[in-house]
Every structure is written in C-alpha cells, then in structure tokens.
Image (tube, rainbow, N blue to C red):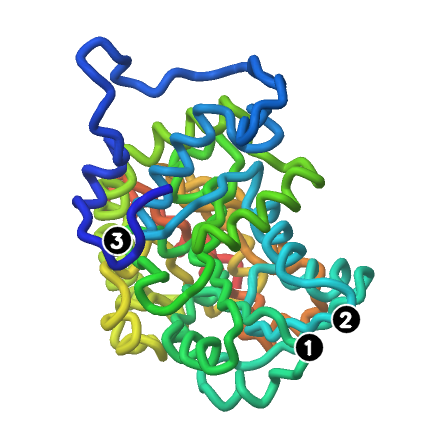
Amino acid sequence: MSEGHGSPRQGQGTTGIHGTDRGRGRKGPVVQPLMMSSTFFGGRGESGDELLYTRYGNNPGQLALAEKIAALEGAEDSLPMASGMGAMSMTLLALTEAGSHVVASRHLYGATRTFLERELPRRGVSTTFIEPDGAEAWRSAIRPETRVLLLEVPTNPLLRVFDPRVAAGVARERNLPLVADVTFASPVNLRSLDHGVTLAIHSATKYLGGHSDLIAGVVSGPSDLIASIRGVMKLYGPSIDPHAAWLLDRGIKTLEVRMERHNRNALALAEWFREQAGVSEVIYPGLPSHPDHVVAREILRGFGGMLGVVLEGGGVGADGFCEALELALLAPSLGGVETLVSQPRHTSHMHLPREEREALGIRDGFVRISVGLENIDDLAADFGQALEAARATR
C-alpha cells in the first residue's frame, strides 16, 4: 500500500499533510472528503471485485488514512480501527489461537494487561510476563507454542524506554513477530519498524489525533499480517468511523509540529520540577537521571510529551496537587494540545492492589502529566501554585 520501511521517503511533516498521493489533479479537493456512506455500489461478482463496505475498513477515507499512516511508519500497510484497544485486541487475536502463548513485558498499559490476563485465557491463550530489558529474559520465556512477543515503549505510566532492538533480535532468532505499543512516542519520535518491530500499534486517540476529540487506533506492519488482522476486524467489527477517520487525518497534518512543541515543553517542565520543593522524583527520559536515558538518546528523535512526578506528600499530596490545578486539566487521557494530569492509581491501574502498583513502581504520590502546547511560563505558574497547595496538605 505504501513504500516499505527501507525505501527513500519524504519528510514526515510533508507526509502528514499530503500523504503519498501526488496525482490529485488541479480540480480535486485540497482536503480529503468525508465519506459518510456505509456501503458502495458493487457486488456483481466480477473476479477480483472487492466489496466496499465501511465495516471492512475500505471506505475511501479509511483507505487514504491507512496509506498516510503506513507512510509515516515506513510500513507496507496500516489498519486504522475504532480504538487503541481495538487495534491491540484484534492484533493479538489474529496472531494467536487456542493453545498459543504470548511473551509480554510486564510494563504495559493497564487495559492491555487485563486483556492478556483475563480475556485471552478464555480463548485458551496464556501469557508470560517478563522484565524486558535483556535478551535472555525473552529467550527463556519462549515456548514451542509462543506466537507473539509484546513490548510497550515508552511505557505507561513510568516512561521506561526498553530497547526494542533487544526483543527484535530474539524475535528474528525464533521467527516470531514483535508487537510494540508505541503510543507515547508517536511515529515522529520513534519509527519502531526501523528498529526491528514487526507490528506497531498506536492509540490514535492520543498524539496522532492530538485534539482530544476522537477515539481511534491503528496497527502498521507487513501487508500479510495486516491482512490477517483485517480479517479478524471484519468479524468483530471495530472499524474506524468515517468521521473519526476524517478527524484523524486532519490531526496528523500537524503531528510533526505538535510533537516538536510537546518535546520542548515537557523537557523544560521536567527540568523545572527538579528544582521545586515537595517533589521527590521527576521521571522523564530526557533527564540524565532516567534509567533509560542512554537508550532514549539513541532511538528517540524527541523525548516525548509525557512526564511523571512523585510528590513527597504521597497520595494526599497528589490529591491536593491535582485539585488545585487551574490551567492544566484533571483527565485520564493524553496527547492532546491541552495539558492533562492524572494519577494512575485512580485511572489506568486502579484495578491493581496497592502492593502490586508499588511493585511496578507506581507509588501513591505519582502524578502523570501529559504536557500540552501552552506557553511554558503559564504551565510553570499553574504547577507552582498546585505544589504549594500540595505542601499545605501535609
């Protein structure tokens, strides 16, 4: 569908705006039309005549979006879907069957882990969770029935940057696909297929869309695997809505410039938080203190818009901090133009007992910040007064 990930390519900013279509002609629309039709003329039975049906993901708007994202990722094909979890679940269902086994990083988005722990076992699929920072951990967990290796980079919410090249090397040795959730990076900060990932998954709700006004997901990779995932999607039905596809295409047009500002603002705030009273730890891959800073410098084009802080006041201090915010918004998502703040103990990891959260490194004072595009001085002022409020609760 698009040029492969070793081919010469135009800049991502250009691709985000124009895609790969240079033949629109002088009388064509500048903006991809919104195609709000569930079905299209066809069905005469001609050989090779594919039925166009929006549930199949081949509405013209869906196809144009898929081609653009594939070009951004350097993939052969992409498949947009109705949500990030739709993309993740359809991918895992397509790659496994009863009796299969998955090897997964233990550092995963909460819903992904729940899907592996509760849903796949109902279909006869088991999972082994590992610490993903060494090749031997991956090798020792693989069984004859293993069908997938699963990684998240950077991780949610602790922003670990586990080197995908390590897992990719093992995946090549064993002829297994490596699936990676790279939502936090976006294709701008990390073209994961260039580092050996087989299938890249994004919750497009986040940075790809960028405006907190749509729900979508996407998986990108080899055309044969995308075809298999598309077959499962047709059965389960989570194709992307045409209007969401149109909004996502519009959001991608500004992805590169937005990510540049997200990267810059988050690094500035990380350095600012390091100097503030009441903050015991700042978690950001762009800081030398981050455990994966060296790897992050090697594989990321930017350190991202996600930032974590641990407050000395624990859960009480974190609650006071969040309640005092006036500019930043308390909301359980990320990747939008506005700054969003959440506590994973109340959102993505609320289903885990406190002991399990702490074992993962999610302490009660942990606050996750999705740094937006506001003026940095305004954000610092808001976070400064919120820190004062948090200190007053101790």
Query: In the rendered structure, which amino acid carries the disc numbered 2?
Result: Gly
Please give the name of the residue rendered at 41% of the width and 55% of the height, measured from the top-left corner.
184
User: Which of the pair 285/128 is nearer the observer?
Assistant: 128
Q: Residue reaching furthest front?
A: 47
Of marks 1 and 3, the one in the foreground: 1
Query: Given contact means CB atoms under 8 Å apart, are the residues at marks 2 and 1 in contact?
Result: yes
The reply, left or right, for residue 25 in relation to residue 4 is left
Number of other residues with Cα within 10 Å of mark 3, as a class: few under 14, some 14 to 19, many 20 or more: many
The disc placed on residue 362 is: none
For the residue pair 326 and 155, the one nearer the viewer reads as: 155
Residue 209, picture quadrant: top left
Judging by the rendered image, the residue that carries numbered circle 3 is: 263
Mark 1 touching mark 3, by CB under 8 A?
Answer: no
Query: Is residue 340 shown above or below 320?
Result: above
The answer to whether 268 appears left or right of 324 in the picture is left
- Neighbor class of circle 2 (other Cα within 10 Å; few <14, some 14-19, many 20+) is few
Question: In the figure, 322 relative to 271: above or below?
Answer: above
- Cα separation between marks 1 and 3: 41 Å
Residue at (42, 26) in percent of width and height: 247
Q: Position of residue 141 (x, y in %)?
A: 61, 85
Location of residue 265 in the rendering, given as x and y in whole percent from the top left corner: 25, 50
Q: Residue at x 52, y 80 (%)?
A: 174
Q: Is residue 48 above or below residue 36?
A: below
